[in-house]
Amino acid sequence: MSLSYKGRDRLIWLGAVLAPVAAVQVVRLFELEPVRAASAAGDVVLAAPSVRPVSKPTPAQEKALAWIAKQDRTRIRDPFAPAPVAAPEPTVFVQPLDTPESEPEIREIAPAMELTGVMDGQRGPLASINRKIYRLGDEVVTGWTLESIDARENVVVLRSSLGNMLELRIKPVSAVP
């Protein structure tokens, strides 16, 4: 009897699938034979579980346990959950223009902006405001231009077209244990 190539391939595939199952069953058969014979003769003795006595914790372990017990677990958050975005609190510094003091100050509403990062780049400092990257002189929001970036202090200053100044700082991240 001769098998076609397709039939031979199917037979090889079936053997590859069933061979591990057959091997496990053969091993089980030979492993359980002595246990069955011993149980039939009544010679089966179960081993008692070994239990180690609990030793007293060391002073360092006691200190660590006390530290763990006093931790506030209510502030732990899911590391995979997106960080909550709080509305930024812009600080507006109104600086008078170089005009006579008889003219009233020009006030305007500061746009909601959040400074999310500052760094010194090879081609000048960069600031991330509302999760977008800006350089000195870029217009961040209509009428507000990026005037200065201080990477050491994490502060940027924006100037409006009316002459008002807005200072943005990176909010410190509270330590979460």
Image (cartoon, helix red, strand yellow):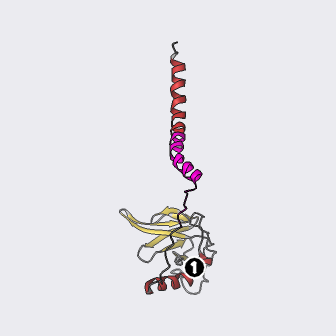
Instruction: Please determine whether, in this image, residue 149 is positioned above or below residue 44.
Output: below
Specify start and end residues of the magenta stretch as a single range: 24-48
- Residue 37 inside the magenta-drawn segment: yes
- Residue 40 inside the magenta-drawn segment: yes
Identity of the residue drawn at 54% across and 34% down:
18
Chief SS of the magenta region: helix
User: Residue 54's x, y, as percent?
Assistant: 50, 79
Total labels drawn:
1
User: Residue 101's x, y, as percent?
Assistant: 56, 87
Between residue 38 and residue 80, name the one nearer to us. 38
Identify residue for label 1: 91
| Furthest residue in direction top, as rendered | 1
Identity of the residue drawn at 60% across and 83% down:
103
Q: Is residue 167 visible?
A: no
Instruction: Please determine whether, in this image, residue 96 is positioned above or below residue 87.
Output: below
Instruction: Please determine whether, in this image, residue 100 is positioned above or below residue 83.
Output: below
User: Residue 94's x, y, as percent?
Assistant: 56, 81
User: Helix, strand, or loop for circle 1?
Assistant: strand
Q: Is residue 130 visible?
A: yes
User: Residue 175's x, y, as percent?
Assistant: 52, 78
Identity of the residue drawn at 53% across and 46% down:
33
Amino acid at dot 1: Thr
Between residue 94 and residue 13, name the one nearer to us. 13
Instruction: Please determine whether, in this image, residue 29 is positioned above or below residue 123.
Output: above
